Amino acid sequence: MHFDIIAPDHIKDESLIHKMGKEYLFTKNQQGQTISSKECQFCHQESASPEMVYGIEDKGFYIIEMEGCD
């Protein structure tokens, strides 16, 4: 699975961001998957859409599903 975790910019703790990813994986029944940032390329540098803002306000993060997230 390939997805991006969008979190508020004040969150710098990688373990907290990994926790957000694990929370997402749980919703996809993929609890055993490894979370890694080694592939991270900071490829999304844009203003948050209203949907992203709502997700961050609601859950504290937003997931951009890229590949294999069905």
Image (cartoon, rainbow, N blue to C red):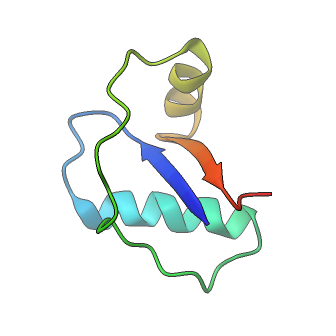
Question: Given the current orientation, which residue lies at the most extreme right position?
Answer: 70
| Residue 49: x %, y % from top left | 53, 15
| Residue 26: x %, y % from top left | 68, 69
User: Which of the 4 image quadrants contains residue 14?
Assistant: bottom left
Q: How many marks?
A: 0
User: Which of the 4 image quadrants contains residue 55?
Assistant: top right
Query: Which of 69 and 56 lies nearest the eye of the viewer?
Result: 69
Image point (44%, 73%), residue name: 35
Image point (48%, 41%), residue name: 61
Question: On the rendered structure, is 51 left or right of 14?
Answer: right
| Residue 68: x %, y % from top left | 71, 62
Question: On the rendered structure, is 68 left or right of 38?
Answer: right
Query: Which of 29 and 58 lies nearest the eye of the viewer?
Result: 29
| Residue 38: x %, y % from top left | 29, 69
Above-or-below relation of 32 to 64? below
Question: On the rendered structure, is 10 left or right of 24?
Answer: left
Above-or-below relation of 52 to 19? above
Question: On the rendered structure, is 34 left or right of 44?
Answer: right
Considering the image in quadrants, where does the N terminus appear? bottom right
Image point (57%, 41%), residue name: 64
Query: Which of 3 and 13 lies nearest the eye of the viewer?
Result: 3
Image point (80%, 57%), residue name: 70
